[in-house]
Image: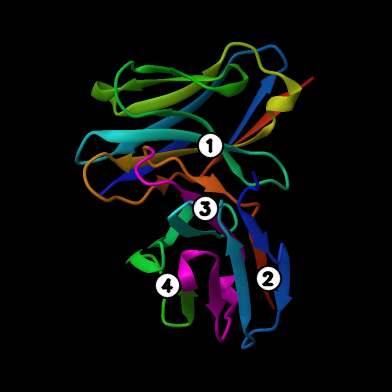
Amino acid sequence: EAGVTQFPSHSVIEKGQTVTLRCDPISGHDNLYWYRRVMGKEIKFLLHFVKESKQDESGMPNNRFLAERTGGTYSTLKVQPAELEDSGVYFCASSLRDRGGELFFGEGSRLTVL
Amino acid sequence: AQSVTQLGSHVSVSEGALVLLRCNYSSSVPPYLFWYVQYPNQGLQLLLKYTTGATLVKGINGFEAEFKKSETSFHLTKPSAHMSDAAEYFCAVRSSGGYQKVTFGTGTKLQVIP
């Protein structure tokens, strides 16, 4: 069974440009989460989808971030326009319903904004 | 609200020595507690978890953790460190009632010295 996959693994963009990160969860996992880790800090929650609906987007930093999960399968996280402080590693995770919160993580997408 | 504090961003142990990584949590309701490990260039993977029942939880690779409610702690231990244990370890908490996102600590990098 394939795990959670994320693309790209690393993206380097200029301030003001747009980047779209993609996450493919484990097949059959209704829950999909986005997290971000800025260097040396905690892994911070961004948002949570249940199927195609946003369950909780309280962690989204501002309206430059847009997450979608069309059809309840893969998800995209778009940053437009990117700022320097958006640099970090963006993790996607998925889980089955009510598995005690166990999350299965992708390898992360490292975003560097210059 | 819930939070996690990991004491020590870097811990060094000699190969064969005891590993002790500290985690304290805050949660207004009974928590679910997790330890995740991240090896270089990989995603996070679940090491062990506590939901209910026995407070001493055993995980993969010889790690275990004990839930101590009175101390609000969930420290991770391993009797004898192996070189392959070198990685970053994250403690995480989720409240057991209703919907709650998983909240992570800042991580502890474990170095194993030969």
Whole-percent x and y of residue B39?
A: 68, 39
Q: Amino acid at mark 2?
A: Thr
Q: Amino acid at mark 4?
A: Pro
Q: Give residue B33's quadrant in the image.
A: top left
Q: Looking at the image, is mark 4 or mark 3 earlier in the sequence?
A: 4
Q: Looking at the image, is mark 2 or mark 4 earlier in the sequence?
A: 4
Residue depicted at 46% across the width and 47% down the height: A95
Residue that carries the numbered disc 1 in the rendered image: B36
Q: Please give the label number shown on residue A76.
A: none
At mark 2, the secondary structure is strand
From which residue to which does the magenta span run?
A70-99
Q: Looking at the image, is mark 3 or mark 2 earlier in the sequence?
A: 3
Q: Nearer the viewer, mark 1 or mark 3?
A: 3
Q: Work out how far the residue at label 1 is from the one at label 4, CA to CA, in angstroms.
A: 25 Å
Pointers 1 and 3 within a single chain: no
Residue that carries the numbered disc 3 in the rendered image: A93
Residue that carries the numbered disc 4 in the rendered image: A61
